Image (cartoon, rainbow, N blue to C red):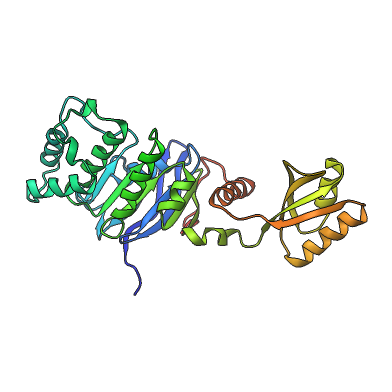
Amino acid sequence: MPQEDMITVEHLIKRYGNYYALNDVSFEIGDGEIVGLLGPNGAGKSTTMNILTGYLAPTAGDITIDGVRLSDDPAGIRRLIGYLPEMPPVYPDMTVDEYLNFVYDLKGCKLPRKEHLDEICSVVRLGDVRHRLIRNLSKGYRQRVGIAQALIGDPKVIIFDEPTVGLDPKQILEVRNLIRSLGGKHTVILSTHILAEVQAVCEKIVIIHRGSIIACEKTDELSRVMEDNAHYRYAVCGAQKDVLAALRSVRGVRAAEPTGERDGDAGVYLAEISGGFETRRAIAGALADRGFLTVGVREAGDDLESVFIRLIDRADGAGKKPGKKPQRGANA
């Protein structure tokens, strides 16, 4: 049965004068999905999240969350969202219980107070610190308090902005497990610079660069967007300059660079190729014709980090520039 969309972003534009922070952005997120929002600094992630949360108004375009359109009911959209910014919005002079009750009242929550807050504290494992001042809690516990406030009101959508920044490895694992447990009941958007975090937690990835969507794929299918090319590691004996010239001379080799690694007397090179077996055969012939000994060849895995960098490089190579006037439907 097809998954229904919880969030639909349609041709979103945010303009400051002649500068386009968002350039005709469109994507969908299914009900109960955990989605990673990725992009370099200044890509448009924060702008997108600020519009989703109702903090910022778009210049053009619209958002629909659970059937509610931002243009029709901004307050209704905000009631559907729980938000944890990068710096948790906690009051250090309150106890955890005081703060959560304050947020409950601030949101106008109608759910049974005690039962609802007890359930949230159980989910985020705050039971042992509910009567302690927030200022006396570790950063990991303060982060849990921030997550707890986002859950108050049982929102359909939860947005996390860099939720594990500054945490130690054990705390990072705990927060990741917590976010993973929220999927299904809630739709979760996770904005982060930590690619391993996205791979560990998210089912889908949206990559934004210079205000435009350059990928929107299931996490385990992201490398498909680069399927025309493959990466191979060649260990070759010979002068680096001459080996690189030989590799780059072959039609079908899109790029070749030294990795800085050594395999005995051989230097290791990373080659991005298209054309499959025919290109690899041509590379073997070119190296042999020049008298270079190839001591090893293996395919380089397409981990998320390498795919992310290649997508950004491809977008830059295609000439995507900030401030360019958007073309309708370019990212649909």
Above or below residue 44? Residue 12 is: below
Viewer-closest of 316 and 260? 260
Q: Residue furthest bottom?
A: 1
Total labels: the figure holds 0
Say which residue appears at 83% left-offset and 62% top-offset: 282
Q: Which quadrant of the figure has residue 186?
A: bottom left
Viewer-closest of 324 and 236? 236
Image side of residue 267 versus residue 130, left or right = right
Say which residue appears at 83% left-offset and 41% top-offset: 240
- Picture coordinates of residue 51 (x, y %)? 33, 44
| Any part of residue 60 in sight | no
- Picture coordinates of residue 5 (x, y %)? 33, 63
| Any part of residue 330 in sight | yes
Q: Which quadrant of the figure has residue 132?
A: top left
Above or below residue 87? Residue 271 is: below
On-image quarter of the N terminus: bottom left
Viewer-closest of 49 and 20? 49
